[in-house]
């Protein structure tokens, strides 16, 4: 069995807030007790609504924000134990692709300068060699090397996103975190970027974490999926298994909210009622205020991830939810 490339153990991140000058600061858990392993070349999707903690998790994985408690290990080395030299090596082996490519790029630098920058900063190549590799990487992501001299404002949104991906891959990283990497693009461009990512993964020795709220996109890009709600993973499993047999009511609601192309299906009530309530995150099930299956136990006892039918689900009533879903499908 392969040694995990990335591991997290009981990862927690809390942010403090003050509502007034004399008010006591309050703490909000953005990431709450998350543990998982990621194997080399594995593709993990992290999905959930805005405010579920997905982006914070991505920043914790890359060491861009320190955890409140818990551990992140990359190649067996804990982030907490890294020296400055270790962090430099880690930065060379990991990368981040952000949501908005225009804000991620420097408007005063040419495309070639920005892609080659990582090679120069880490002294991987001389200037001439770095620019040659940058031009080759542009071609690899489907752009012409003639765009090396352009500036970000001279390119379309899809082209800029390809540039950001090229910059992220120029150092041949082993792990990339894609944080809502296609959500700012229109549907036709999304399809092109998805096809590009599929192709690059086939070519490269690469593992990635793909963070998104769009369940239409993620099913084509990952092997395994983790569904987050208010900082917790409520369900995880193989992508096909979770899509075909969701065991948590929140996962089911997310899947039901995906628009259908069937013209006969119209005017359906929203599968989720209400808004995320962070005040309910301290104890009990975080989803209970919006869950049609909630019982008294859900308010007093926090469900833990447990094995159920080949997946892991954090729900006291997973068996009942599964039976109800099966009855709906049969009907």
Image: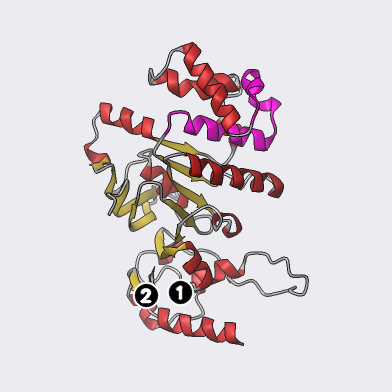
Badge 2 element: strand
Q: Tag 2: Cα neighbours inside 10 Å, few (<14), some, or many (≥20)?
A: few
Badge 1 element: loop
* Separation of residues labelled 2 and 1 (CA atoms): 8 Å
Tags 2 and 1 touching, CB below 8 Å: yes
Residue annotated with mark 2? 308
Q: Looking at the picture, how far across and down is residue 203, in whole percent?
A: 49, 40
Report the magenta residues as a range.
143-172
Q: Tag 1: Cα neighbours inside 10 Å, few (<14), some, or many (≥20)?
A: many
Q: Is residue 162 magenta?
A: yes
Instruction: Look at 36% across and 54% down and name the residue there.
Output: 27
**Quadrant that contains the N terminus:** bottom left
Vertical placement of residue 296 versus 171, above or below: below
Instruction: Count how many numbered circles sit on residues in the image.
Output: 2
Between residue 249 and residue 247, name the one nearer to us.
Answer: 247
Between residue 247 and residue 299, name the one nearer to us.
Answer: 247
């Amino acid at each position: 069995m392969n040694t995990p490339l990335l591991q997290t153990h009981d990862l927690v991140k809390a942010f403090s807030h003050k509502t007034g000058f004399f008010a006591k600061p309050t703490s909000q858990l953005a990431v709450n007790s998350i543990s998982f392993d990621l194997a080399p070349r594995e593709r993990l999707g992290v999905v959930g609504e805005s405010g579920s903690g997905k982006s914070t998790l991505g920043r914790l994985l890359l060491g861009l924000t320190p955890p409140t408690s818990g551990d992140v290990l990359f190649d067996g080395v804990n982030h907490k134990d890294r020296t400055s030299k270790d962090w430099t090596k880690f930065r060379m082996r990991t990368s981040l692709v952000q949501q908005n490519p225009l804000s991620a790029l420097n408007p005063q630098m040419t495309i070639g300068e920005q892609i080659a920058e990582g090679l120069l900063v880490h002294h991987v190549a001389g200037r001439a060699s770095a620019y040659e590799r940058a031009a080759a990487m542009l071609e690899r992501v489907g752009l012409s090397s003639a765009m090396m001299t352009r500036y970000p404002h001279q390119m379309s949104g899809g082209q800029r996103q390809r540039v950001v991906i090229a910059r992220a891959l120029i150092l041949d990283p082993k792990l990339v975190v894609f944080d809502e990497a296609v959500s700012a693009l229109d549907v036709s461009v999304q399809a092109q970027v998805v096809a590009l990512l599929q192709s690059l993964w086939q070519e490269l020795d690469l593992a990635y974490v793909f963070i998104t709220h769009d369940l239409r996109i993620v099913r084509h890009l990952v092997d395994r999926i983790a569904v987050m709600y208010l900082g917790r993973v409520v369900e995880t499993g193989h992508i096909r298994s979770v899509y075909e047999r969701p065991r948590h009511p929140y996962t089911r609601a997310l899947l039901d909210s995906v628009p259908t192309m069937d013209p006969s299906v119209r005017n359906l009530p929203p599968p989720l009622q209400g808004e995320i309530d962070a005040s309910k995150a301290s104890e009990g099930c975080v989803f209970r205020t919006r869950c049609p299956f909630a019982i008294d136990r859900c308010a007093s006892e926090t469900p833990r991830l447990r094995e159920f039918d080949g997946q892991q689900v954090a729900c006291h009533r997973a068996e009942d939810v599964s039976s109800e879903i099966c009855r709906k499908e049969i009907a």
